[in-house]
Structure formats: structure tokens, C-alpha cells
Amino acid sequence: MRHAVVLGLAVFLGAVLPAPSHGQWVEAPGTGWVQLQVAHQSTKEGFGQTGTVVPLDELDPSARSIITTARLTGALGLVRGLDTWVDLPLHRQEFNGAGTDLLSTGLGDPRFFLRAGPSLFGVGSLPVAVALRGGVTLTTGTFENDAETISLSQGQRDWSVLLEVGKSLHPWPMYVSGWAGYRWREENEAIARDPGNEWVFNAAAGGSLDRFEWKIAVDGLFGQSALDTRTGFAFAPRELVQITPTVGWRLGPGALQAGVRIPVHGQSTRSNRLPASSTFTLGYFLSWDDPLWK
């Protein structure tokens, strides 16, 4: 039970993370951005099958999960209308319960994407920025089918396709952006679990005033029922919607950013509990408009 609970919490921290403010604008060749962010969550609670908030471990209500993730994310323009997007997480996961203290530290599952905009196909400027992003989550993290070990990986590959849009509200120093897509999830053969495919979305508005930056985003996930491929038993589908306010301050060549991800709706099965507590983030965002190559 504890193994499954912590797996469900930890790997979800980056599953529907909103992109930085540059997210929907395909980078020009040689330009891009990079963000280093640390996220921290400490919780005793998760969402149950009916959307109510319940203890992570109903047999031990005092049990607590503590997760800290350092995440390096970046994008780089390759050719006109095409860029690449990479996300590399490092997890520290702790689960403390009656008579059981578990700890795992190491690399999580990285994500790699290619993103194409209209200019790749010779289409001129449009009223809104549009891009199509497709990619894969690899299982390079450590997955352990062991009740006494916290896994750092989901244990299967995921494939995603996302449609992104964005628009600057110039002359006002504001923008709106969003994306929506579908994630195909392969079977986790180690535990005979088909995790179920998922719809994901993100909508955001943000802006700046001198050195001050702000952003508020809503992101969510709506999954299909997971399936035990040995017995045919269907688990409750996963759902999670979060509101994420973020503020930033221009410091040096980039911006220091702080935010909080606040879950407002959720649903999950007992063996794969999703968090019902806030996650706090602190990071540094750096972009460059001078191409790395000419």
C-alpha cells in the first residue's frame, strides 16, 4: 500500500506542469530558455475515489509523504518553426508511517518533445501563436515492485500530443496561453497494470511590470480507468485540477520565480493516491534571444 501511494504522489508532480511564459511561442533557431525549479510537498492527504479528501494511508492516518523535486527544463530552437523541449527531474521521496520510514533519491523519468509551428510549413504569421508538440516520457528512473521501496519511475513509457496556442496582448504587458492534449500510456509489465490514457490541459494568463512578473495557470488531468491486466479489474480513473499562481522578479540575466500549486479537484484509487495538499515552488528562469549559432 505505502509503495503504491508514494509512487502515485511523486511521479505526478511533473505530469501536468505548465510551461514557462515562453511556452507557446516556438523558439527561433539557436534561441531558447532554461529553467531550474525546486518543488516541495509535504502531505498526509490525498483524493479518494469520490473526490473527497482522505488520508494517504487509511490504515495509518498519521503517515506522511515528503517529496522534493529539482527539475531542469529547457527549450532550444533547431530550425525555423521547430524546437526541442526537454524536462529532467531529480527526486527525493520520503514516506513516514507507523514503524516504517522509507527514502529514495535519484533521477526520475525524463520527457523529450519536438514542437512545430506554422512557419515550418511555410505558413506566415497568424493572429495567435500556434504549435503542435509531441513527445515521450522515458522510464529511465528506478522502478521497484517492492512494498518497502519508493519508486522513482512510473515504470512505463508515455506518449503525448499537445496543441498549444498563445497571444500577446500588446500594448498591454500581458499574454494568454494554453494547451490541451492526449497522453497514451503503455502497460507497466512489472505490476501487470495498464494505467489508462489521459487528457491533459493548461490555461494561463500572465504579464510584467518593470522587474515584476506574474502568472496564474489552471492545469488538469482526466484519465481513463487503470486496468489490472491479469484479472481485468478496473481501478477508479485519476482526475486532478490545480490552480498555480506564480510571481517573479527580474534578477541578473533572468528572473527568480516563486509559486504554489493548489489542488482544487481530484479523484484517485486507494492504490495510486493523488495529492490533496499544495506544492511550493522556487526557481530561476533564463531566456536568450541572441542565437547560439548564426
Image (tube, grey):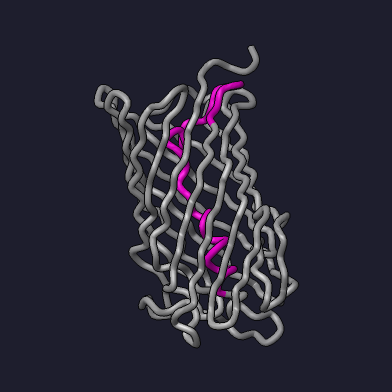
- Res. 46 visible in picture: no
Which residue is rendered at x = 51% and y = 69% of the image?
Answer: 65
Which residue is rendered at x = 48% and y = 51% of the image?
Answer: 39
Q: Relative to 184, does residue 62 appear above or below in the rendering?
A: below
Q: Residue furthest left?
A: 172
| Residue 38 x/y as whole percent | 50, 47
Please name the predominant secondary structure of the magenta segment in the image: loop
- In the image, 254 versus 154, the foreground residue is 254
Relative to 175, 137 lies left or right: right
| Residue 149 x/y as whole percent | 68, 72
Q: How many labels sit on residues?
A: 0
Quarter of the image for residue 276 reads: bottom left
Relative to 136, 18 lies left or right: left
Q: Relative to 206, does residue 269 appear above or below in the rendering?
A: below
User: The C terminus lies in which quarter of the figure?
Assistant: top right
Q: Residue furthest front?
A: 99
| Residue 60 x/y as whole percent | 49, 84
Residue 20 part of the magenta segment: yes
- Res. 69 visible in picture: yes
Q: Residue furthest top?
A: 294
| Residue 81 x/y as whole percent | 57, 27
Q: Which residues are magenta?
A: 5-33
- In the image, 138 versus 25, the foreground residue is 138
User: The N terminus lies in which quarter of the figure?
Assistant: bottom right
Which residue is rendered at x = 44% and y = 48% of the image?
Answer: 281
Residue 206 part of the magenta segment: no
Q: Relative to 79, does residue 233 appear above or below in the rendering?
A: below
Which residue is rendered at x = 47% and y = 22% of the image?
Answer: 253
